[in-house]
């Protein structure tokens, strides 16, 4: 099992850096992962996406698609790409402490 250390906290991750134990996720861990992903600050818009991902994952047991983020979450696709450039669902899921989306390679 691989681990990473963020601000003195060790978390379990897979080979791509996704948390393998969601209970280790905190907002501080999210901020540290975001910085690794090139997002210097998590804004209210970022948190809205993260909160929706986590809530939907708990309710449905799977990550929502970008389309679901748009239609159910009310997050426009263009905004999602602006908030999480270069793979929005992949980055957002990682920051949210969730598994890598199966739709992403």
Image: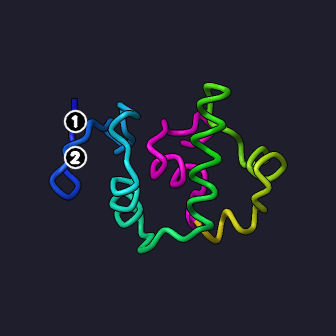
Residue where numbered disc 1 is placed: 2
Q: Nearer the viewer, residue 24 or 91?
A: 24
Residue at 62% across / 36% down in the picture?
Answer: 63
Answer with the quarter of the image where residue 82 lies.
Answer: bottom right
Q: Which residue is at 27% across, 36% downward?
A: 12
Q: How is the image coloured?
A: rainbow
* Residue 64 spot, x, y in % from top left: 68, 39
In the image, farthest residue toward the right: 71
| 2 and 1 marks in contact (CB < 8 Å) | yes
* Quadrant in which the N terminus appears: top left
Magenta stretch containing residue 86, yes or no? yes
Quick one: SS at disc 2?
strand
Range of the magenta residues?
84-105
Query: What residue do we see at 49% from left, 68% from top?
Result: 42
Which quadrant of the figure has residue 13?
top left
Question: Alpha-carbon distance for marks 2 and 1?
Answer: 7 Å
Report the residue marked by disc 2.
4
Asked if residue 2 is positioned above or below residue 83 in the image, the reply reads above
Instruction: Please provide percent x and percent y for residue 45.
Output: 62, 67
Identify the main secondary structure in magenta. loop
* Numbered label tally: 2
Q: Which mark is residue 43?
A: none
Image coords of residue 85 (percent x, y): 57, 67
Residue at 34%, 63% (x, y): give it.
Answer: 36
| Residue lying at the far left of the rendered structure | 8
Q: Assign the C terminus to one quadrant of the image.
A: top right
- The answer to which of 43 and 2 lies nearer the viewer is 43
Asked if the magenta segment contains residue 17, the reply would be no
Q: How dense is the environment of label 2, judged by Cα within 10 Å: few (below 14), some, or many (20 and up)?
A: some
């Amino acid at each position: 099992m691989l681990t990473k250390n963020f601000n003195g906290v060790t978390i379990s991750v897979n080979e791509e850096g996704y948390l393998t134990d969601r209970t280790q996720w905190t907002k501080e861990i999210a901020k540290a992962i975001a910085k690794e992903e090139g997002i210097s600050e998590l804004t209210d818009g970022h948190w809205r996406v993260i909160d929706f991902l986590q809530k939907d994952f708990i309710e449905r047991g799977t990550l929502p698609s970008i389309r679901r983020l748009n239609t159910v979450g009310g997050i426009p696709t263009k905004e999602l790409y602006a908030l999480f450039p270069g793979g929005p669902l992949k980055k957002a899921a990682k920051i949210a402490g969730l598994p890598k989306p199966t739709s992403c390679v």
